[in-house]
Amino acid sequence: MNRRTFVKTSTLGAVALVTSCQADQTAGFIDTHTHFYDPTRPEGVPWPNKKSPLYRKVLPKDFLEVASPFGVTKTVVVEASNRLEDNQWILDLAKENESIVGFVGNVDPTIDNWKTHISRFAKDKNFKGIRLKKSINKLSDSSIINSFKLMKDLNLCLDLNGGVKALNAAVEISKNIPDMRLVVEHLPGRESFEPSAAFKEALLQVKELPNVYVKISSVLVKVAGKFITDPAKYTKSLDLLWNTFGEDRVIYGSNWPVSDLYNGEYKDVFNVVNTYFSEKGVDTRNKYFYKNAIKAYRLFKN
């Protein structure tokens, strides 16, 4: 099968499977990791910077243009801006765009009046949790752990930016709050071709934690200036994640539009994981592309 035929077949397969699942509220696959921003706003954006090729208006309609041909019609947005009120900007955007079904904010527990801010945002049904950034290095601080306990009480989830550090953080947080829902982002990441011993060991530690999900949202890598798009090249690392977490704890994310720089075009990002999970059968494929996301982020619930 040549590449053009493969892409066409994968696209049609995605649409067919989505059509067969219209009884579900999603009516489409869910990409659990996108970023939206608008540099033309009067206040501009703190990220990306003006010299970056990512510096352009990126909104839900732009996402749907690249994702919907593959049956991906919903998204969970992850906030990259460190400006507090940019969280509200995304929540307001979600009110106008039904493609946004969840939002993971950037509200670091170390900021002043964190409890007030997190409680305010949590009143919005689309606010599903926060992404842990600098506080990932402060897990020995009891006040940080207490902040996570409040999040759990508010039925919020915690995203951890990928790699060994995030996996180890998931273990540490789970020791203190066993029933806290955690999502480790951007796996396999740097471990795509030759998973390291440290990565394998960290995965084993997380394997026994049922409330930890992994977001397979960073797979493709660049070699000699070109993205490797052959799905077979990633079987080893994807097998490692599959054998560790099984069909109920893996979820789909693209990291679009950042993926354009670091992982390749959306069609290639989708095709690699689609090829892998299609071989597991329709039920497993649907769990990866949307059903597990609903569980991890408590989507479609007020």
Image (tube, rainbow, N blue to C red):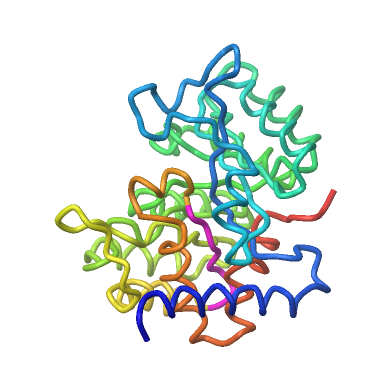
Residue 7 in percent (x, y) is at 46, 73
Residue 48 in percent (x, y) is at 42, 28
Residue 186 in percent (x, y) is at 42, 54
In the visual, does 163 lie left or right of 99? left
Residue positioned 61% across, 38% down in the render: 59
In the visual, does 141 lie left or right of 21? left
Magenta residues span 247-254
Relative to 178, residue 43 above or below: above
**Residue closer to the observer: 155 or 43:** 43
Write down the quadrant of residue 272 in the picture.
bottom left
**Residue closer to the observer: 266 or 140:** 266
Residue positioned 49% across, 61% down in the render: 214
Residue positioned 60% across, 68% down in the render: 289
Write down the quadrant of residue 31 in the picture.
bottom right
**Residue closer to the observer: 53 or 255:** 53
The quadrant the N terminus occupies is: bottom left
Relative to 149, residue 211 above or below: below
In the visual, does 114 lie left or right of 219? right
